[in-house]
Image (cartoon, grey):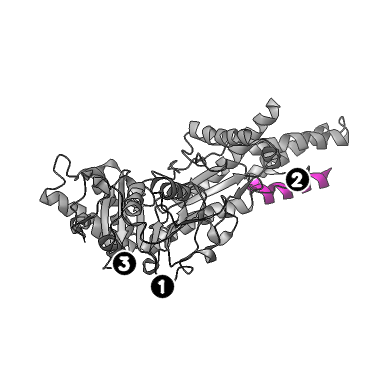
């Protein structure tokens, strides 16, 4: 029996990092009591009592490590089969939405105190603030000096639509789609613009199309980072420098977090609400000299609404790219974007923002690697997004359910943590496969992601237990 207690001592010390005082309370004192009773109790019941009581006593004193393969008296146990205790510490910031995304660390409403509210956006001070936002974009995103940058209506969607409607049709176009937003651009070009010469290169969620099939004698429309699938192009090596057509890149969840090679991109769009943690409704449209030449040389045979018109008399309306916006902008949103970009500059610029996103992704990747119930939706490691991290629930008990039940299970995991104020808005996109989508851009803190993962394990185990009980 004493050898048995010695074995318990080794287990508690190695698996739970308990100090001597704790071990005395958990092992030595019960040993003394049970030794006194040993003459009246058989050997086996003593071990049975200890096996039953001591692990439960320990679980009340320490937050369990749900990702670890714990060694217990009954052998290795999978996390989902182990009784779970809710983690003790919540993320300091529970915002993990993929848009609008979390504000930058340290943000408070006070940063908007200097916003020119109540002033015309055409007033000289207001135009100076708008121009400051444009120049900060150039500095922080490292946009070439000869590229135009404009603030346009309707977020990233508006920026993409402006160029598609104004410039497509001069030559054939290759449309790349591997998630819902890319598929949306395909719908616009085929069913709304109704262009004759359109090729669609598609891939299912979790994969990229064959980039070697793209014809750069044609215009090419693609998303750099698939926000709803967590799949991104790994780099711009597949785009030739001597292309004939234009490359039109929806970079809304890539800008400021992934390296964009502007020499390979003619049109780049994004919105402040993603990697900057800014506000919605405003888009950014960046045009290369080649894109400007297309706008000035090609007049599409279709009507263009006012908010899409970028030329007048065959010339670019330069004012759009010099703080003379097409329509009224929110000076609150301008102020907020300026604050976010100044923060980006202060922490070290573009490389520092990208490094933060990479470090955040690593927290999630390390957790996924040692967790048996979850996997990346993106199949290839070099194509996995470091911002919109999309995950599938792969536990056999869940994948055996029909599609609706799997979706309901994932939503239940999200709802459980939402109700507790642990994490908000991290469910998969409505058109994407059921699962989780966690924003890991640079405005999120790695420590908050590290605190989130034990809660994910706990919520999964609780929902799985509830599912089993209901069966």
Q: CA distance from mark 1 to mark 3?
A: 12 Å
Q: Looking at the picture, does residue 165 appear above or below residue 432?
A: below
| x and y, in percent, of residue 181 in the image | 45, 48
Is residue 32 visible in the rendered image? The answer is no
Q: Secondary structure at mark 3?
A: helix
Discs 1/2, front: 1
Q: Looking at the picture, does residue 213 appear above or below residue 72?
A: below
Q: Residue at x 66, y 49 (%)?
A: 68
In the rendered structure, does residue 18 fall within the stretch colored magenta?
yes
Q: Looking at the picture, does residue 355 appear above or below residue 165?
A: below
Can you tell which quarter of the image residue 240 is in?
bottom left
Q: Earlier in the sequence, mark 1 or mark 2?
A: 2
| Drawn side of residue 169 relative to residue 16, left or right | left
Q: CA distance from mark 1 to mark 2?
A: 66 Å
Q: Looking at the picture, does residue 230 appear above or below residue 467?
A: below
Q: Secondary structure at mark 1?
A: loop
Q: Earlier in the sequence, mark 1 or mark 3?
A: 1
Q: Nearer the viewer, residue 37 or 46?
A: 46
Q: What is the magenta range?
A: 1-20
Q: Earlier in the sequence, mark 3 or mark 2?
A: 2
In the rendered structure, does residue 96 fall within the stretch colored magenta?
no
Q: Give the residue pinned by disc 2.
A: 8
Q: Which numbered disc covers residue 277?
A: none
Q: Give the residue pinned by disc 1.
A: 241
Q: Give the residue pinned by disc 3.
A: 290
Quadrant assignment for the C terminus: top right
Q: Residue at x 55, y 40 (%)?
A: 455
Q: Nearer the viewer, residue 225 or 398?
A: 225
């Amino acid at each position: 029996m004493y050898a048995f207690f010695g074995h318990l001592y080794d287990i508690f010390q190695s698996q739970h990092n308990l100090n001597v005082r704790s071990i005395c309370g958990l092992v030595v004192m019960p040993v003394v009591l049970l030794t006194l009773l040993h003459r009246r109790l058989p050997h086996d019941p003593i071990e049975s009592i200890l096996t039953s009581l001591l692990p439960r006593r320990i679980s009340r004193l320490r937050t369990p490590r749900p990702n670890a393969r714990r060694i217990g008296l009954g052998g290795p146990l999978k996390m989902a089969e182990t009784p779970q205790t809710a983690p003790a510490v919540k993320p300091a910031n529970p915002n993990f939405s993929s848009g609008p995304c979390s504000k930058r660390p340290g943000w408070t409403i006070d940063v908007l105190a200097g916003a020119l509210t109540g002033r015309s956006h055409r007033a000289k001070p207001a135009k100076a603030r708008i121009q400051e936002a444009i120049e900060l974009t150039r500095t922080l995103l490292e946009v070439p000096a000869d590229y135009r940058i404009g603030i346009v209506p309707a977020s990233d969607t508006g920026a993409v639509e402006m160029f598609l409607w104004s410039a497509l049709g001069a030559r054939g176009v290759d449309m790349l789609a591997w998630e819902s937003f890319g598929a949306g651009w395909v719908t616009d070009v085929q069913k709304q613009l109704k262009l004759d010469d359109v090729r669609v290169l598609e891939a299912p969620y979790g994969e990229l199309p064959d980039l070697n099939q793209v014809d750069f004698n044609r215009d090419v429309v693609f998303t750099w980072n698939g926000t709803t699938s967590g799949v991104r192009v790994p780099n711009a090596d597949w785009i030739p420098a001597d292309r004939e057509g234009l490359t039109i890149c929806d970079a809304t969840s890539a800008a400021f977090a992934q390296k964009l090679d502007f020499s390979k991109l003619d049109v780049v769009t994004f919105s402040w609400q993603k990697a900057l943690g800014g506000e919605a409704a405003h888009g950014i449209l960046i045009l290369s000299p080649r894109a400007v030449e297309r706008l000035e040389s090609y007049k599409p045979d279709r009507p263009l609404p006012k908010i899409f018109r970028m030329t007048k008399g065959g010339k670019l309306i330069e004012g759009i790219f010099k703080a003379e916006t097409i329509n009224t902008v929110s000076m609150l949103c301008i102020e907020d974007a300026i604050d976010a970009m100044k923060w980006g500059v202060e922490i070290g610029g573009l490389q520092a923002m990208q490094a933060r996103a990479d470090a955040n992704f690593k927290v999630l990747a390390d957790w996924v690697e040692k967790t048996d119930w979850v996997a990346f939706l993106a199949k290839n490691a070099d194509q996995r997004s470091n911002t919109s991290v999309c995950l599938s629930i792969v536990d056999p008990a869940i994948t055996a359910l029909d599609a609706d039940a799997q979706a309901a299970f994932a939503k239940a995991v999200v709802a459980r943590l939402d109700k507790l104020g642990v994490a908000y808005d991290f469910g998969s996109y409505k058109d994407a496969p059921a699962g989780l989508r966690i924003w890991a851009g640079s405005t999120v803190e790695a420590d908050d992601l590290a605190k989130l993962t034990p809660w994910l394990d706990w919520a999964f185990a609780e929902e799985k237990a509830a599912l089993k009980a209901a069966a």
